[in-house]
Image (cartoon, rainbow, N blue to C red):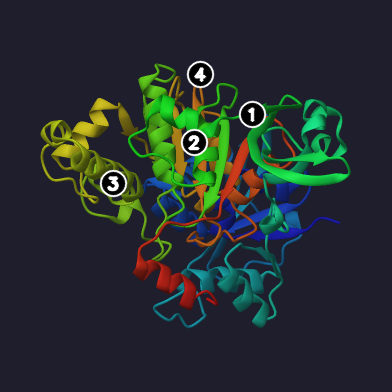
Amino acid sequence: MKKRYLIDTSIILDSVENLSILYGGENILFISDIVLLELSKKKETLGQSGYFSREFFRLINHNLGKEIEPETIGLSPLKKGDFLWQTYLKEGENLIPLYILSRSFYETPMPDWGQNDLKIAEIALDYNLTLITNDTALKIHSLSRGIQAESLLRDSVNNVDSIDFFYQHTCHIDTLHSLKEQTWFQSLSDWSLIEIIEEENTGNAHYLNGKKQFGFKIKGAFVPQNLDEIIKTHSPYIAPLNLEQKLYYALLLHPNNRITVASGATGSGKTLIALQAGITLFKLGIVDGIVYLRNTITANDKEAELGFRKGGEFEKLDYFMYPLYSAINFTITKMQKESLAKRIEYRGESKGEQRAEATEYFMKKHNISIIDIAHARGITISRKFVIFDEVQNASNATVKLIGTRMGEESRIVFLGDLKQIDHPYLSRNRNGLATLLKIASIDDYIAAIKLKQTIRSEIAGWFEDRFNVL
């Protein structure tokens, strides 16, 4: 039996591909004029929302549009002033029928907030349509009014907190050469981070000899990593401070690693160490530069994206690039303290919210550029080290968009914190970071690390400890 769905804006902004999934070859898809207006407003903005809004209108074949009678698709007669228009959404070589319901006058009393949501719910109620929305508030409101409402929560990851990539194992020195044959080792996926605690024996007495080995599983074999020697050899501007950061740095530099996922809280060193690794790869000539991008979502409200801020494109983008500038300025400050020559070279004040002289010079010297996600479609990023920050606020479709832009000899690291979901339609278990972590736990092509140690100020540590119930 065919189902009749009224599609909310949130579904399209998650991914235009959702319409194909809901259609399923036979279901009937409706959108209201309100959704069209919201999408039209969004398409002028930068960021993920702007991209998917433009993609939606690009795929609509308006030349085939026509007015139709509701009875032809089993819909109840139209209310006075309503209008039904049939158009098509292009999906590859196929066309998905899409029906637009327009209303001249909405009866529901409208408060200043949530006007569009209430109008969409009114259409669903009047025509007995199942509302599909990822907006939790709209879904709850609709259900409370007796409206059928569902969410399309694709790719939700269960138990994401249980996923880990670091393994400790006590191993007798006589069996180190046979790790490949040991069951525990065979069960690990490639790019697992491994700590081997060495054990010896004297007669029947077994004891730990105080030695440890660290390494990765690569192509089914244990590949030791002399972490301190790697850091000494490459001498990054900011050296990793703990074991996690050392493993992270070594992982990013490994010649066989092309994709890395790093999760961790603020202060764990995600962006800072990624920047140091990118600079090292640039100095070695392995990449031609560093590209930083971040989804333009804020913690304020769902409209506070790039397009709503003052200034030109780069002024708007600067606001969202604070994590990068913070890492750069921390690096510059340390260099200036350690060397008079660096104080002379990196002259001028370095600021986090705007690229002052020292910051601009640093970025130019290391060929660091920033890209907005909205401009990623149609480009190829070749021979670059790409840092995609705040990926917990990106949908899977956005992750795929960026991933498919990677050209030859490029590398990419995805950074994020599952505790910092600011996107209005994503959740802790359904976002780009959670999906990447899940894939990394079973796929040998992608590496991942969870940074659990944070290096924070005394004040930040106090808030972390006292407000950990929130």
Residue situated in front as seen by the camera: 39 or 209: 209
3D distance between C-alphas at marks 1 and 4:
24 Å
Q: Are marks 1 and 4 in contact (CB under 8 Å)?
A: no
User: For mark 3, what is the residue?
Assistant: 330
First along the sequence among labels 2 and 4: 2
Mark 2 vs mark 4: in front: 2
In this image, 338 relative to 452: left or right?
Answer: left
Q: Position of residue 364 (x, y in %)?
A: 24, 28
Residue 64 locus on image (x, y percent) = 59, 38
Separation of residues labelled 3 and 4 (CA atoms)? 29 Å
Q: CA distance from mark 3 to mark 2?
A: 17 Å
The amino acid marked with disc number 3 is Phe
Mark 1 lies on residue: 224
Instruction: Say left or right for 424 vs 233.
Output: right
Cα–Cα span, label 3 and label 1: 31 Å
- To which residue does mark 2 refer? 249
Q: Is residue 59 visible?
A: no
Q: Please tell me which of labels 1 and 2 falls first in the chain.
A: 1
Mark 3 or mark 4: which comes first in sequence? 3
Q: Residues within 10 Å of mark 2 (few under 14, many from 20)?
A: many
User: Of discs 1 and 4, which sits in the foreground?
Assistant: 1
Q: CA distance from mark 2 to mark 4?
A: 19 Å
Residue where numbered disc 4 is placed = 409
N-terminal of the two: label 3 or label 2? Answer: 2
Check disc 2 and give the amino acid type: Tyr
